[in-house]
Amino acid sequence: MKAMTLILPTVFFLSVSGPTTLPAVLSAKPSAAIIAQDSNARPLNTEATIEPGSRVGPLKLGDTRDRALELFPKKSEDQEWENSCGTTLDWVDAENPTGHGDLLIRLKKGKVFQIESTTTRFHTAEGITTFDHSEKIASAYKDLRAFTLLTPPAPALGDRPLVFWIDKKRGIAFTFAYYPQEHKRYLYKITVFEPNKNFCPEEETTSSPKWQSIPPYALEPPPELAPNLR
């Protein structure tokens, strides 16, 4: 496993939610990291577990801003901004040996209401993490609904609308980006939110006309929603 880690490229993610200057850029193919994630030999660290409707690692929904900054101290590369969904703290996982990612901490009235991981540092109890294939998520989560967000596609995320698989009752969402070279989707982000409460997809609201339901477990918007996809 150590040898595999050493050959992985450094990966920077483009967070499509952020200020005018986005915090990171996808500068390497995700395929090498996908190969690494297919290994069942990766140990699971309970301190890095993503628990639906509850926490990402040590950070819990409902924690204060001070607690969030205690657990994830602000560094020079980290950012903070305001939007219609509240305040976002963007903590860059700069020391992750399998490639840099981000932890996006969303706050309202000084309390954490949503946590988003684009880093392989964190994983679900089933071992699901960034770069995993959709089949792994589908086999572990049986009641997911699918949505797409019809905002302008980001080149670093495949120039296609993001696709979301969501279990609102459990409080977890899986966001898929597109990898053009392999003509397939990969897991870009895992989001935890309070069960049966509002979810902010990429700083949009679920009442936005840009937020559209698609068939369960679909990985592409239908032609009537995204006619330019091929």
Image (spheres, rainbow, N blue to C red):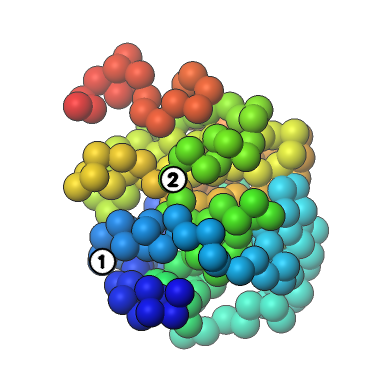
Q: Residues within 10 Å of mark 2 (few under 14, many from 20)?
A: many
In the image, residue 220 lies at what x, y percent? 36, 28
Q: Is residue 12 visible?
A: yes
Question: Which quadrant of the rendered structure holds the C terminus?
Answer: top left
Vertical arrangement, residue 171 with respect to residue 103, above or below: above
Label 1: which secondary element: loop
Q: Residue sitting at 26 percent across and 60 percent down? A: 29
Dividing the picture into quadrants, the one containing residue 121 is: bottom right
From the image, tell me which residue sits under label 2: 133
What amino acid is found at the position of numbered circle 2 in the picture? Answer: His
Q: Quadrant of residue 210?
A: top left
Vertical position of residue 80 compared to residue 3: above or below: above
**Amino acid found under the numbered disc labelled 1:** Ser
Q: Residue 174 at x, y = what percent? A: 54, 43
**Between 33 and 54, the one nearer to me in the picture:** 33
Residue at figure coordinates x 64%, y 51% from the top left: 126
- Does residue 227 lie above or below 19 as drawn? above
Q: Residue at x 50, y 52 (%)?
A: 189
Sequence-wise, which precedes: disc 1 or disc 2?
Answer: 1
| Residue underneath mark 1 | 27
**Which residue occupies 60% across, 56% down?**
127
- The numbered disc on residue 182 is none
Of the residues tagged 1 and 2, which is closer to the observer?
2
Q: Is residue 72 left or right of residue 137?
A: right
Residue 95 spot, x, y in % from top left? 47, 82
- Residue 94 visible within the image: no
